[in-house]
Amino acid sequence: MWRCPLWIPARPTGSARVLHQLSFALASLPVVLRQALWRPDVVWVCAPAFACTPGALLAARLAGAPAWLHLQDYEVDVAFDTGLLRGALARRWVTGLERWLLRRFDVVSSISHRMVQRALQKGVAHDRVRFFPNWVDVSAVQPLSRPSDYRRELGLDDGRVVALFSGTLGAKQGLLLVAEAARLLAVRCPQLMFVICGNGVMQPTLQQATADLANVRMLPLQPRERVPELMGLADIHLLPQDPDVADLVMPSKLTTMLSSGRAVVSTAKPGSEVAEVVSRCGMLSAPGSAAALADALEQLVNDAPRRASLGAAARAYAEANLAADQVLGRFAAQCEALRAGRPWVALGDTAVPADELAEVRDIP
C-alpha cells in the first residue's frame, strides 16, 4: 500500500473540492505510473475520485494492460445537479471531458443497473459495460438475536423503537428531512428514538436542528469492528435521498442495512434503483416530504410484525444478491476473461464473455 498526500480545504466549496481531488490525482500520479513497470494483467480504478482516471488510463497503456473504470457514483453529474459546481459552459466542458475518458476504458462498470444505463448514455460501448454491485460480508453483519450493546450505552429501554441513520453526513443525503420528521413525531410517537451516527459537512447543521429534541441522539463515526452491533441497534434503518441525484448514486450503506435484517424506510424517488430494492424490504415515502417520512415511520413503529417481516426480506435479499463471495467471485472471473482477451457480447444492460453466452441463456 502506498499513501499519497492531498490538500484538504478548510471550507469545502465547489472549487475547493475540485482542487482537493486534483491534489490527490497529481500526488498519486508518479506512484500509479510506476506500477506499469511490473506489467499488471488489468489496471482497475474506482471513481470517486474521477480526477485519478487519466493517470490510471495512462498506466494501463504503458503496461499494455486492459483498463477498467468502476463508478461508485457519477460525481460530475452530482456536483452540477446539487449546485456544488455551476455554469452551463463549465458543465458542457467537464461532461465532454468525462465522456471522452469513459469511452477510452476497456471496461466501465457501476453498482446499479440504472448507473450502468447512464454509462451507455454517455457513449460507452455496450460490450464494455459491466454490472458490479457493492457487496457485504453477510457472515459479519447479521441480525442480532439479542439487544444491541448500544441500547445500554444510550440508556434505551426495550420499549424504545430505534430509527437509525448511519453514514456520511453529506449534503446529498437529504438529512434535514430526518430532523423535521423527528420534530413531527416527538409527541405522536414518544416510543421512537432517532439515532444519527456519522461525521460530515452536515453535522453542525443537524446538531443545531435537533438541539432541542429529546427524541434524537447523535453519535460520531463508530469503529469498523462495531458496525454489526450498530446495525443491530436499529429497528428501522433510515435512507433519506436527494431526489435530484437518486439515479446517480447507489448508497453503499444500503448493503449493510439489508444484511442486518432490519426494515428500511427511504425517501428515494419512485422508479429509481434504490426504490426498487427498498420496496421489497421496507417502505418508501415521498421525496422531500418530512410529513410523508413521519407517516411511514409511525406505521412501522406501531406494527412490530410488519417490521419483522420486512427485516427478514431484507436479509434474504442480501444473502441472495450481495454476498461478498458471490460478487467478488464474479469479478475475479471477469478479470480473468479480460486478461485472456476473450471477446465479450452485450446481454441486457451488461456484457458477458462470448463463450459463456449459451450457458448464461440456459439459466432460467
Image (tube, rainbow, N blue to C red):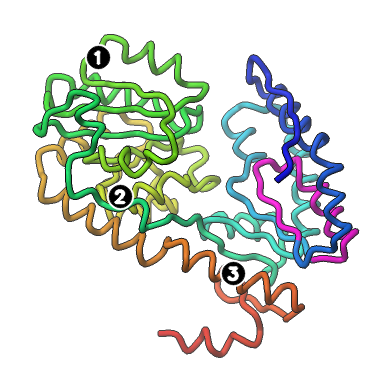
The residues tagged by marks 1 and 3 sit, at their Cα atoms, a distance apart of: 47 Å
Span of residues in magenta: 43-65
- Name the residue at 85% across, 54% down: 59
Total numbered badges shown on the rendered structure: 3
Q: Disc 1 residue type?
A: Leu
Marks 3 and 2, the one that precedes in the sequence: 2
Under tag 2, what secondary structure?
loop
The disc at residue 350 is 3
The disc at residue 213 is 1
Under tag 3, what secondary structure?
strand
- Dot 2 corresponds to which residue? 260
Tell whether label 2 touches label 1 (CB within 8 Å). Answer: no
Q: Disc 2 residue type?
A: Ser
Q: Disc 3 residue type?
A: Thr
The verdict on residue 58 being magenta is: yes
Q: Main secondary structure of the magenta part?
A: helix
The disc at residue 224 is none
Q: Nearer the viewer, residue 98 or 107?
A: 107
Q: Nearer the viewer, residue 11 or 153?
A: 153
In the rendered image, the vertical position of residue 50 relative to residue 117, given as above or below = above
Please indicate whether residue 235 sits to the left or right of residue 32 in the image: left
